[in-house]
Image (cartoon, rainbow, N blue to C red):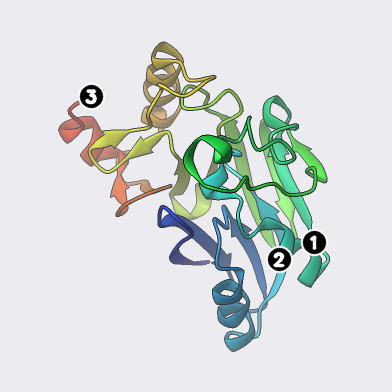
Amino acid sequence: MNIKTMPLGPLGTNCYIIYDEFNALIVDPGGEAGKVIQFLDEEKLTPAAILLTHAHFDHIGGVDILRNHYGIEVHLHEEESGWLTDASLNRSLAFTAEGITTEAPDQLLKPGKIEIATFNFEAVYTPGHSPGSVSFIFHSERKVISGDVLFNQGIGRTDLPGGDIKLLESSIRNVLYTLDNNFVVYPGHGPETTIGKEKTCNPFFPG
């Protein structure tokens, strides 16, 4: 399994393309959908789904173009099921001159094991940055996509509506930090890190 990192959209949000020889998953396409399409075409990959760690505007800007171009479904936690269609809830009205909206999600994510195409992974509920934040754990590959929950020596902000610092701390300590130290963390912004490094060096929630 390979992971391509593509900083996209107004805030350079990390979009991740998870792929093997033929299939792909698209995680958090924050904008610039053409760059995603170009990469998939060059690598001759068929995307199977769009996965969203949460529905803030900087993670969803490319959703509809990619969904319609490939005819694939969008997966989002039920706590934020109405955010894609509401520019106030996804905070785009507060941060951009024009609101960003998409069609509603096709599938509501539930915590647990998920199999899509050739990919097997676990969705875990990690609220705190937003009420519907999830992380995607690829156990066999020892990789976790953490969205805006855990960063390289940082944590997600909790001052937006629906944020909760105590929930965020619980998500990090009781969910993500239970993974082995050698798990690679792919955050929503900035460079990758490891669980072990964050337990040692994270200034907010050391392990």
Residue 176's spot in the image, x, y percent? 42, 31
Which residue matches tag 3?
Answer: 204
Residue 111's spot in the image, x, y percent? 67, 30
- Nearer to us of marks 2 and 3 is 2
Q: Amino acid at mark 2?
A: Leu
Residue 50's spot in the image, x, y percent? 68, 55
- Which is more toward the observer, 1 or 62? 62
Which image quarter: residue 24?
Answer: bottom right
Q: Residues within 10 Å of mark 1 (few under 14, many from 20)?
A: some
Q: Residues within 10 Å of mark 3 (few under 14, many from 20)?
A: few
Question: Which mark, by number, is residue 150?
Answer: none
Residue occupying the point 58% across, 69% down? 19
Q: Is residue 152 visible?
A: yes
156 left or right of 87 in image: left
- 67 shown above or below 45: above
- Nearer to us of marks 2 and 1 is 2
Residue occupying the point 37% across, 49% down? 189
115 left or right of 133 in image: right
Disc 3, SS: loop
Does the residue at mark 1 contact the one at mark 3 (Cβ under 8 Å)? no
Mark 2 and mark 1: Cα distance apart in space: 8 Å
Which residue matches tag 2?
Answer: 66
Question: Which mark, by number, is residue 72?
Answer: 1
